Image (tube, rainbow, N blue to C red):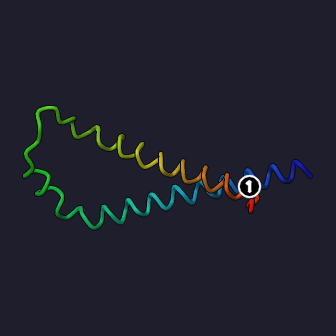
Amino acid sequence: MAAMAETWARRRSLTFGLLAVALVAIGSALGQLATFPNLAPWYAGLAKPSFKPPNFIFGPVWTALGAKPSSAGSRTASASASRPVER
């Protein structure tokens, strides 16, 4: 019985994780669709400081920044779903 509960908890945790990643990816895609047409001329016109990182750094950094909320949301939802509500 305990093994079955552990399998169920693991499956639920994986489901919450995939849902969190999907929500962040959908939000990111919608934001990109809304801003991409005007992004190049806007960004090119900005006054940038001398310490601006190179452009190729932004992809990996934003990927990591997107993964963090997914992970935190998944762990929070999984933890709250596995604990009974105390009143």
Mark 1 residue type: Ser
Where is residue 62? Give x, y as percent.
36, 46
Extreme residue toward the front, this view? 87
- Looking at the rendering, which quadrant does residue 33 occupy? bottom left
From this view, report whether residue 3 is shown above or below residue 31. Answer: above
Count of numbered circles in the view: 1
Residue that sits furthest to the top in the current view: 51
Q: Residue furthest right?
A: 1
Which residue is located at x 15 percent, y 55 percent? 40
Relative depth, front residue between 2 and 56: 2
Q: Residue at x 10, y 57 (%)?
A: 41
Left or right: residue 60 versus residue 81 is: left
60, above or below 20, in the image: above
Q: Nearer the viewer, residue 46 or 82?
A: 82
Q: Residue 16 at what x, y percent from top left?
A: 62, 57
The image quadrant of residue 37 is bottom left
Q: Position of residue 39 (x, y in %)?
A: 18, 58
Position of residue 49 in the picture relative to residue 22 (left or right): left
Place of residue 17 in the rendered image (x, y in percent of width and height, measured from the top left): 59, 53
- Is 24 left, or right, of 39 in this rendering? right
Residue pointed to by mark 1 = 82
What residue is rendered at 67% in x and 56% in y? 80
> What residue is drawn where x is 87% and y is 48%?
3
Image position of 70 (left or right of 12): left
- Element under disc 1: helix
Q: Quadrant of the C terminus?
A: bottom right
Q: Residues within 10 Å of mark 1 (few under 14, many from 20)?
A: few
